Amino acid sequence: MIYLDNSSTTRKKPFCVLNAVLKATWHSANPTRSSHTPSLNAALKVYNTREHLKSFFNAPKSANVVFTYNCTEAINTVIFGTAKKGGNVVITAFEHNATFRPLNKLIKTHNITITIVNPNSLGEITSDDILNKINDKTYLVIVNQTSNVTGSTVKLNNLGHKLKQKNIMLMVDTAQSAGHEKIDMQSIGANFLCIAGHKGLFATQGIGALILNDANVEPLKFGGSGSNSLLTTMPEYYPEKLEAGTINTIGISALDAGVGYVEKHLDKINSKVEKLSNILINYLKQNKNITLYSSNPHSGVISFKFNNLDNNEVCNTLNEKYKICVRPGLHCAPLIHKFLKTEKTGLIRVSISYFNNFCEIKKLIKALNKIEKNHN
Amino acid sequence: MIYLDNSSTTRKKPFCVLNAVLKATWHSANPTRSSHTPSLNAALKVYNTREHLKSFFNAPKSANVVFTYNCTEAINTVIFGTAKKGGNVVITAFEHNATFRPLNKLIKTHNITITIVNPNSLGEITSDDILNKINDKTYLVIVNQTSNVTGSTVKLNNLGHKLKQKNIMLMVDTAQSAGHEKIDMQSIGANFLCIAGHKGLFATQGIGALILNDANVEPLKFGGSGSNSLLTTMPEYYPEKLEAGTINTIGISALDAGVGYVEKHLDKINSKVEKLSNILINYLKQNKNITLYSSNPHSGVISFKFNNLDNNEVCNTLNEKYKICVRPGLHCAPLIHKFLKTEKTGLIRVSISYFNNFCEIKKLIKALNKIEKNHN
């Protein structure tokens, strides 16, 4: 079986992650809920992982790390927790429904407006494109750093610092970029990084994170915080303010291990993913029956379609006949599909991980050739 | 090390749970996000776990199972998703901050009122006590089935059916009761069961569930649902409506295994937990320097305090000198502590799991005796 749907969830995890999961499950305890040794050990693991994430993303010392169920929850927390009545939010056409749907809710409840930054003819969006779209009412800019459809990456430069001058906050959705890009929160000047554990960072599902700096966020959920139990609301300090109920120590341990792995191997990951992606991109480019929508081998995300075939059917054949797993459809990203005019057909998305190999990409190309030939 | 803080998180998990966690991590894939085999296998696992939970809790066929991050999220989803301006919610004094804090938020945003049902002189709350408190504005009743402080269990009987006649919904928080009580959703007539994975059901942290029946709930979070990507809101059908973003297939697999284990061993679990609890309860009852607040051996939750000692210090000594882990403080349950007038001192809570043994309880009793003696 050849798994090329790593943008949904990386299938193969490094052994250090499996080991961390097993160890944390075997040593289950509730961090910050008691003063006994297993609870303190769990709390230490959680604390160290917060510090690890801050160092990995070069977050300022003053930043706080909040653990969430997934990246979607981190994004929802920021969007609902900073909502401003009648305000404007600038987003890119790369945004996922994790951003687009909560904003649509705010249109109804808070009368906000959304401004969408579309890509240029090369499929790219620049910081300047984003800056050009802000208006007097803009209070928040949201950028999905790497499109989960085209794989195009927004070069953020120091966007957050420029926005700060206008009192505008910046949230970066790193769901597809973390584990591929070197992300420097301080250079970017972002107020929020939203993080998915189970993709490029090789952690398990059920864990995400929000790093926040120089911004206040109202809680989305309320519950036990392990301290100040007599308070009728969440404590005002972070991370407790945004972490209601028992957190996922097992997922957090997996994230710690996964981030450690990426930290150590990022150059190798980039080099391999680029090499494998380029092989596929070159093939797709020269096939005149195919339209290619991706040109960034760095991200490992490559979307395309056969001009004369049902692309859902192609994916089914890849799975059934060749045991190759890719993802058809709209990838929960309606804006970019509408922009590309592919919202009716969808696209075939191949997403490559460090754990894929040359042979697998060759087999995919062979299979695509055969499917095309059988159809003609 | 003797772990007696199982109401926070059960430390020891059955091997089938460890096995499920490892298998699911090794076979990571995103359920309902693609049509390839690993994704379909993950979706099948998730579907089967939903059915398993329905059967375990004897939920009606029409009920829906939604997976959440933890029980707190399930409770928040119900409270915010059914909020009624100016309405009244009846709760018990057993409620956890997972319920009390979101309701306090609704007092501010929706002008609701809360009515609290206190226990009788035996520390018990009956269905009739609850029914007696409802008023014309009551739209929701919330019952924490087993207090996480006293271990007292509310006999729900057919409370939900009676409330339904008055158009009032019933939510049952099973965080401490699931895995100890046989819970029959149909007999109770509950609209909502909120479930914690990592306690009596022996699953991992990072997974909870909400079973809902005959009720509509607005989403708390918005994001990718794997289908209908062009919709600007969540789909109207369950579970998709309430599951934004990637769900925790690994936690779900653990929950499936844990529930299977409890299903098979419930009688043995009850018998052992009762036996061990009774040994401790009998000791605590006859110690005149101790006030005991628990009388339900079935729950495994036993809280008490030394009348003349600093009970936090006792817990620290238990941990440091005897390597015995119990939980001091308020247990995120301010209402019952206020009722018991223990909100200043807190209580020592011992919580017993099926995986504890006779020897451990004897050692705890010995340690408590020694601490008492050393103090005198």
Image (cartoon, coloured by chain):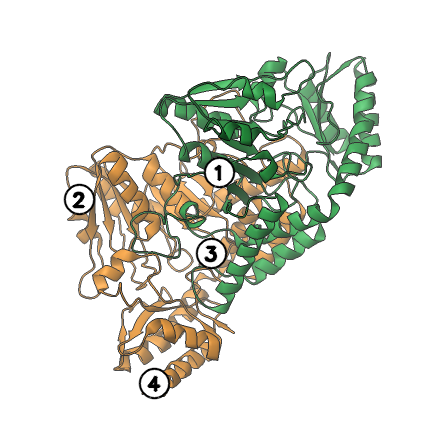
Chain colours: A orange, B green
Q: Report crowding for label 4: few under 14, some 14 to 19, many 20 or more residues within 10 A (C-alpha).
A: few
**x, y percentage for residue B68?**
50, 44
Determine which residue is flagged by label 3: A201
**x, y percentage for residue A103?**
28, 43
Cα distance, mark 1 to mark 4? 49 Å
Determine which residue is flagged by label 2: A134
Mark 3 belongs to which subunit?
A
The disc, 2 or 4, on the residue closer to the chain's N-terminal end is: 2
**x, y percentage for residue B201?**
65, 43
Residue type at numbered disc 1: Glu
Determine which residue is flagged by label 4: A375
The disc, 3 or 4, on the residue closer to the chain's N-terminal end is: 3
Which marked residue is nearer to the observer: mark 1 or mark 3? 1
Pointers 3 and 4 in contact (C-beta within 8 Å): no
Seen at 26% across and 61% down, the residue is A337
Q: Quadrant of residue A340?
A: bottom left
Q: Report crowding for label 3: few under 14, some 14 to 19, many 20 or more residues within 10 A (C-alpha).
A: many
Residue type at numbered disc 3: Leu
Q: Is residue A163 visible?
A: yes
Cα distance, mark 1 to mark 3? 25 Å
